[in-house]
Every structure is written in C-alpha cells, then in structure tokens.
Image (cartoon, grey):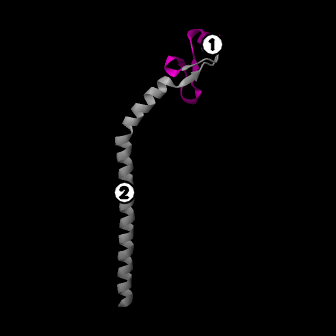
Amino acid sequence: MIKYLIGIIISLVVLTFVRAVWGIIQKAVVDEVKSAVSDDPTPNQANSVPDADTTLRKCVTCGTYKAESLMRRHGDGDKRIFFCSVECEKKANS
Ligand SMILES: [Zn+2]
C-alpha cells in the first residue's frame, strides 16, 4: 500500500515538473515569437535603411570610398562589388 502511494506521489511530482518545464518552454517560445514580431520591424527599418545608404563601399576599380547608395552595385550578397562611377564600371568590364 505504501509503495502504491509513493508511486502515485512520484508520478504526480514528475507530472507537475514536466508541466512546469513545458509551461516555461511554451512561454519562452511565445515571448520569442512576440518579440520577433513586435520588435523587429521598428529597429530594422530604423537601422538597416540608413545603414544601406551610408555604409562606405570601395570602388573595385579606383579604390574610392563612397556611400553605398551612391555606388553602382553588381551582384548580390558576398559577391557584391561596387563602382563609384560609370567610367570605373566600364574600365572593369573592358
Ligand atoms: Zn572608381
């Protein structure tokens, strides 16, 4: 009888523990999603747009640094290269 009671108590404790952990995980996930949804657009719009415009890029032909928004861009991602002017672009292509 005592063994039976101990078994019930242990299973209750384990259940409670699992539920608590599961609750914490769910809460963490929900908070994560909420913060990703609610926080992301504002800092991203505030940061990435001016960053993209003002980040200095090096002209691959003459080595001049200019704001990215003023450069002529070729390619995407890591393979992006920048030219400061049409002349430098032509030089690179010829
Ligand atoms: Zn150049």
Three-letter amino acid code of the residue under disc 1 = Asn
Q: 7 or 61, which is in the foreground?
A: 61
Label 2 and label 1: CA atoms lie apart by: 55 Å
Q: Is there CB contact under 8 Å for labels 2 and 1?
A: no
Above-or-below relation of 16 to 8: above
Q: Residue placed farthest to the bottom in the image? A: 1
Above-or-below relation of 31 to 67: below
The residue at the point 38 percent across, 82 percent down is: 7
The residue at the point 35 percent across, 56 percent down is: 27
Q: Secondary structure at mark 2?
A: helix
Residue behind mark 1: 93
Magenta highlight range: 67-94
Front position among marks 2 and 1: 2
| Residue 35: quarter of image | top left
Is 73 included in the stretch rendered in magenta?
A: yes
Q: Quadrant of the N terminus?
A: bottom left
Three-letter amino acid code of the residue under disc 2 = Gln
| Residue 79: quarter of image | top right
Q: Secondary structure at mark 1?
A: helix
Q: Earlier in the sequence, mark 2 or mark 1?
A: 2
The residue at the point 41 percent across, 34 percent down is: 44
Tell me the quadrant of ligand 1: top right
At which x and y percent is residue 19? Answer: 35, 66
Is 83 included in the stretch rendered in magenta?
A: yes
Above-or-below relation of 54 to 89: below
Mark 2: few/some/many CA within 10 Å (<14, 14-19, 20+): few
Residue behind mark 2: 26
